[in-house]
Image (cartoon, rainbow, N blue to C red):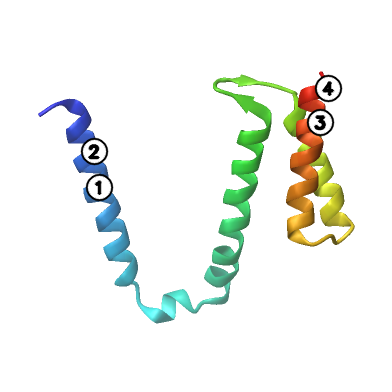
Amino acid sequence: MTTFWIATLGTSAIAFALKYSGHSVPERWLSHPKIQRINALIPIALLSALVSVQSFTDKTALVIDQRIVGLAVAITALLLKAPFPIVVISAAVSSALVYNWF
């Protein structure tokens, strides 16, 4: 068995243990207001980190390219309270135009 498979099986076992232990947490711990506020903010933090990494990096280097234009257009559309499909389409189109222009 190679190191890759040992790492894969070990990671799978750890993920299963974490998910199983999550179901064993008492309800009174989860109903605490501070825990509920933290749980509400976790997806926002993860999505922000994902957008940052995907927008400003290329493999291991920081870059500034057409993706930043798309992100700026998306943020502007969100501030103008545009519907989600319009936000996505406008960001994609502006990013593609800048990519093809330069």
| Type of amino acid under label 3 | Leu
The circle drawn on residue 8 is: 2
Q: Earlier in the sequence, mark 1 or mark 4?
A: 1
Q: Residue furthest left?
A: 1
| Type of amino acid under label 1 | Ser
- Distance from label 2 to label 4 (Cα)? 44 Å
**Are circles 2 and 1 on residues that touch, CB within 8 Å?**
yes
Query: Residue 55: where, in percent of width, then height?
Result: 67, 34
Q: Residues within 10 Å of mark 2 (few under 14, many from 20)?
A: few
Mark 3 secondary-structure assignment = helix
Q: Nearer the viewer, mark 1 or mark 4?
A: 4
Q: Would you say 36 lies left or right of 75 here? A: left
The residue identified by callout 3 is 97
Q: Is residue 18 above or below residue 9?
A: below
Query: Residue 16: where, in percent of width, then height?
Result: 26, 56
Q: Residues within 10 Å of mark 4 (few under 14, many from 20)?
A: few
Q: Report the residue at 78% width, 24% height from top.
A: 100
Where is the C terminus found, in terms of image quarters?
A: top right
Q: Report the residue at 61% width, 61% height from top.
A: 41
The residue identified by callout 4 is 101
Q: Residue furthest right?
A: 80
Query: Residue 24: where, in percent of width, then height?
Result: 29, 72
Q: Would you say 58 lies left or right of 73 here? A: left
Q: Nearer the viewer, mark 2 or mark 4?
A: 4
Q: Report the residue at 31% width, 57% height from top.
A: 18
- Distance from label 3 to label 1 (Cα)? 42 Å
Mark 1 secondary-structure assignment = helix
Mark 2 secondary-structure assignment = helix
- Distance from label 3 to label 4 (Cα)? 6 Å
The residue identified by callout 1 is 12
Closest to the observer: 92 or 55? Answer: 92
